[in-house]
Image: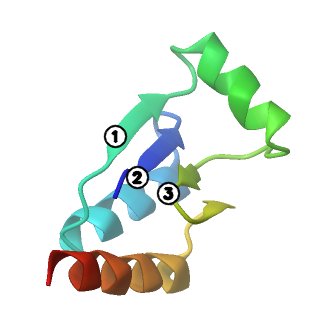
Amino acid sequence: MAVTVYSKPSCVQCNATKRALKKAGIAYTDIDLTQDEDALEKVKEMGFMSAPVVVTDSDTWSGFRPDKIKVLQQAVQTVDA
């Protein structure tokens, strides 16, 4: 399952999200919104105005969402089983 985290440096919620994904054993691609203008525009076009924005095959959300990460972890474990 592809997971992309659009984040910014020194962003508390971004760092918490990436730590939680790593702890859950979920591989992700991190894209720095301050370095990639195209990614920033893409996130804005999706309607998000704050980081992090997490995009998966089946869901998209903004902010630190442990509930969503837990559901994602269960989905990944089911696929791997």
Q: Quadrant of residue 19?
A: bottom left
User: How far, Cα to Cα, is label 1 from label 3?
Assistant: 11 Å
Q: Secondary structure at mark 2?
A: loop
Q: Is residue 69 left or right of residue 55?
A: left
Residue at the image position 52 percent from the left and 46 percent from the top: 11
Asked whether the beta carbons under mark 1 and mark 2 sit within 8 Å of each other, the answer is yes
Identify the residue under disc 1: 29
Dot 1 or dot 2, earlier in sequence: 2
Residue at the image position 57 percent from the left and 26 percent from the top: 33
* Dot label at residue 3: 2
Identify the residue under disc 3: 56
**The one of 22 and 80 positioned closer to us in this rendering:** 80
Q: Is residue 4 left or right of residue 62?
A: left
User: Label 2 crowding class (10 Å Cα cut-off): few <14, some 14-19, many 20+?
Assistant: some
Q: Position of residue 60 (x, y in %)?
A: 63, 59
**The one of 77 and 5 positioned closer to us in this rendering:** 77
Assign the C terminus to one quadrant of the image: bottom left
Q: Secondary structure at mark 3?
A: loop
Q: Is residue 35 left or right of residue 2?
A: right
